[in-house]
Image: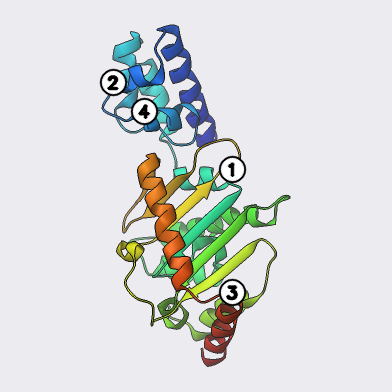
Amino acid sequence: MTNPSGFVSYFGTELRRHRERMGWPREQLAERVPWSVWTVASVEQGRRKPPPGLGEHADALFNLPGVMTELSKKAQDDSSPFGDRIELEQRADTIYEYDMRLVPGLLQTEEYARLVHRARRHLSPEEVEELVQLRMRRQRILDQEPPPLLHAIIDEAVLCRRIGDPAALREQLQRLAVPRRNITIQILPFSACLHEAIGGPISVMRFPDAPDVAYSDGWSRGQLIDTPGEVLRAHRAFQQLAALALPPDMSAEMIEAYAEEA
C-alpha cells in the first residue's frame, strides 16, 4: 500500500496548485469552504489530512469532477486512528505531552503498550500486536539524530494505576526513571490544584519550518488543533502544568519510589 503520508502531501500540493491557478490567496479559498484559513494552510503544507468533504468542495470550485475527491479518499486511507499525529511527530523538533490516564505512548514499554491495548476488548490479538508494533515504531523518532526534545508531564495517578501485571508496571516505571538527554519528565502530584488541562490529555508539537499544532487525545479518536488561538491556549495550559508539577529530579525520585512498591 502506498504510504498514506505521501497522499496527504500530494493532496496539499494539488490544492495549493489549483488555488494559485485561480489566482486566489488562501483567505479567498477559506471563504469558499467551511474551514478556516489555518486548516487550509495545514492541509496545503501536508501537516494534516484533508477533512472529510474538502475534496468534494475542491472539485466543485476548481471544476475537477471527482479528482480531488478521490485523492482525498486516498489521503484518508490510514490504518491508524491517529495518523495525523504520527506524521506530525516525525517532523516535530519539540513535543510537549500531558496525560493523566497512562504513560504517554512515546514512552511506553512494549509490554505496557500491549496490556493497554488488550484492555480494548473489541480488538483481536492480531490487531493488538499491530498497534503495539506501530507504537514501538513511533518511538524511533526519539533515537534519531538529532532527536526531538520531549517534555512529558504525567499525573501521579499513572504511577500507581495497575494495568494487569505488577511486573509490567515496574518495568515501565524503571524505564521512565532512566535519564535521557532529550527527554524531560515531570510528575504532577496529587496535591496539585485544578488546572486548565483537567479535561483531558494534550500534546503540543513545534516545527522548525511551520506553525505549532496541538493534539487533543479523546476516548475514540484524536483531534488536531491548528487554530493559533487554541494552540496558544494549549501552550499556556502546559506551562501552567509545568509550574504545578514536581521538578525533574524530584519527579525521578517519585517514579523510583513507586517502582520499588510495584
Q: Which residue, given by chain and number where applicable, does mark 4 sit on? A: 37
Q: Which mark is residue 248?
A: 3
Q: Nearer the viewer, mark 4 or mark 1?
A: 4
Q: Is residue 244 visible?
A: yes
Q: Which residue, given by chain and number where applicable, does mark 2 sit on? A: 31
Q: Which mark is residue 91?
A: 1
- In the image: residue 67, left or right of residue 110: left
User: Tag 2, which secondary structure?
Assistant: helix
Q: Residues within 10 Å of mark 3 (few under 14, many from 20)?
A: some
Q: CA distance from mark 4 to mark 3?
A: 39 Å
Q: Nearer the viewer, mark 1 or mark 3?
A: 3
Q: Earlier in the sequence, mark 3 or mark 2?
A: 2
Nearer to me, 57 or 92: 92
Which quarter of the figure has residue 72?
Answer: top left
Q: Earlier in the sequence, mark 1 or mark 3?
A: 1
User: Tag 1, which secondary structure?
Assistant: loop
Q: Residues within 10 Å of mark 1 (few under 14, many from 20)?
A: some
Nearer to me, 14 or 36: 36
Establish if 9 lies above or below 171.
Answer: above
| Three-letter amino acid code at the position of disc 1 | Arg
| Three-letter amino acid code at the position of disc 4 | Val
